[in-house]
Amino acid sequence: MRFLPVNLNAVLVELDDLAQTLALLQSLQTEAVAGVEELIPAARTILVYFNPTLTQLPQLIDAIGARSVGAQVERSSHRVQIPVHYDGEDLQEVADLLGVAPADVVRMHTGGEYSVAFTGFAPGFAYLSGGDARLDVPRRKTPRTRIPAGAVGLAGTFSGVYPQASPGGWQIIGTTPVKMWDLERVAPSLLRPGYGVQFVDVATLSPEALAALMTACAGERVAPAASDDAAAAGAVFRVEAPGLQTLFQDGGRLGHAGQGVGASGAMDRGALRAANRVVGNVAQGLGVDTACLEVAYGGLTLEALQPAVVAVTGADALIEVLTAQGRRYAANTYAALALDAGDRLIVGTPQAGSRNYVAVRGGWSVAPVLGSASTDTLARVGPAALAAGDALRVGSAAGLPPVALAEQAAFGMPRANEEICLDVVLGPRTDWFAEQALATLCGQAWAVTPQSNRVGIRLQGDVALTRAQAKELPSEGTARGAIQVPASGQPVLFLADHPLTGGYPVIASVASYHLDLAGQIPVNARVKFRVVRAFDVVETAPA
């Protein structure tokens, strides 16, 4: 095993092949290691998140390094049959690459059983191993900008089905009418690690047989949500103007990597927790990670329909109240604010920072998705962004402690045209870059481009980062804070809604204690990086 540094709370374990990876994953899931919080498996790696207050990296390496990677992985007894129309635009090209006819490709693809090795890229996207060994084809040289939902593709020795329309470079050989990801199913992801999968040619099925497969894949359905009329009846606020983007965000959704779903959550978690502490959301089932409204670049106006207590934290913005009597006054951030029916809360454009957090005493009453109210903009999981006219409900404030009076921002908010220094931990793929690339990474200021969002900050430098290795990197887990470098050499700093796995090398990651600061950096600011931990690889002999 090779242990590659990722961050102060994460390490990447690299193994020889998929079989070893799955064996180690099974061992870690069967007998957990103290302090480990999340496991993200991929083709030859497992990204391990751990709690530094419960375990330290040397102890973690010792515990994982002692595990056997030669065990036979126990397969799930669950089997899924997926009907496929073999009409993909790359079917002929795949046949030519293999030196066979398209009908032979179909027979190969339907002739064997696959197993879900791991998930990633998007919710419900499963990397399927097994099947006919002859189906080994490279990704397309030029990825497509859009592949439709349900497209069945090949890449290397893996098969997969795109759960939603997205860019992609897999060779498309067909399409399926089955939903791979459906939030109306009790288990949204049709495929989970370990499941057996068989593809079935629709051309060989009767209408009755196809209908039976579709019913089996539809699965158990969730109960219908409450009607909009019921939600509006108990509303405490009405959205008058939603601003550029206002989302519900909380501490995120851990534990759903098996469905290809990342954590997401607030971009500035410290500000989220401070907002909840200000209004007293720390008891009676509420916690400091209770959902707040995350307001990007201001513009939010809420009308209070009933009396309520709120707080706004995060970016330095003008917070105003327009009373029902027409009086307008400025309010402080990081302070409790009592609103009467008819008052309007206005969150202005930030002068520094980029995101504000609005908490309400009692907590916002919003239906969670997979245990969290956070909205993941990349994965399209979670409540919809606020829109004008939306009615917002609030939970009970009974039993809550008094409001807090001593909250303040954890750091000075970054400004546009200002240079912000972020500490970084080298790895996990620092050695994939030319020696000069590291000097370039830390030696120049990187401009924050307008293409930045909750997925990540797209950076632009005068000098691009050059790679020492040109080979393709197998998909592996990516962490919040990862500085991923695509072929252009212009890096992307991953933030809360980053993809669960990625195929470009990561040269370094922003230290975990600077992630909130990174989440507040506005467009047109400049970023400089400072190394605080060297690229230190630990190798152990597998047990």
Image (cartoon, helix red, strand yellow):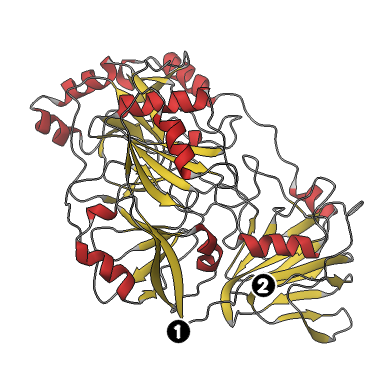
| Left or right placement of residue 221 versus residue 179 in this view | right
Question: Residue 125, located in which quarter of the rendered image?
Answer: top left
Eye-nearest disc, 1 or 2: 2
The one nearer the camera, 4 or 470, is 4
Which mark is first along the chain, 2 or 1? 2
The residue located at (29%, 66%) in the rendering is: 490
Q: Amino acid at mark 1?
A: Asn
The local secondary structure at tag 1 comes to loop
Query: Image quadrant for the C terminus?
Result: top left
Is residue 222 found left or right of 452 in the rendered image? right
**Quadrant where the N terminus is found in the figure:** top left
In the image, residue 307 above or below residue 147? below
Measure how far apart labels 1 and 2 are at the Cα level: 21 Å
In this orientation, which residue lies closer to the viewer: 428 or 210? 428
| Residue 537 % position (x, y) | 32, 46
Residue 541 seen by the camera:
yes
Query: Measured from the top left, where is residue 155 in percent x and y?
Result: 25, 36
Number of marks present in the image shown: 2
Query: Which numbered circle lies on residue 409?
Result: 2
Residue located 43% across and 34% down the image: 62
Measured from the top left, where is residue 193 in percent x and y? Answer: 44, 27
Q: Secondary structure under badge 2?
A: loop
Three-letter code for the amino acid on which mark 2 is drawn: Ala
- Crowd band around label 2 with a 10 angstrom C-alpha radius: few (<14), some (14–19), many (20+): some
Q: Is residue 475 shown above or below 390?
A: above
Is any atom of residue 386 visible in this view?
no
Which label is found at residue 417? 1
Residue in view at x 82 percent, y 57 percent: 235
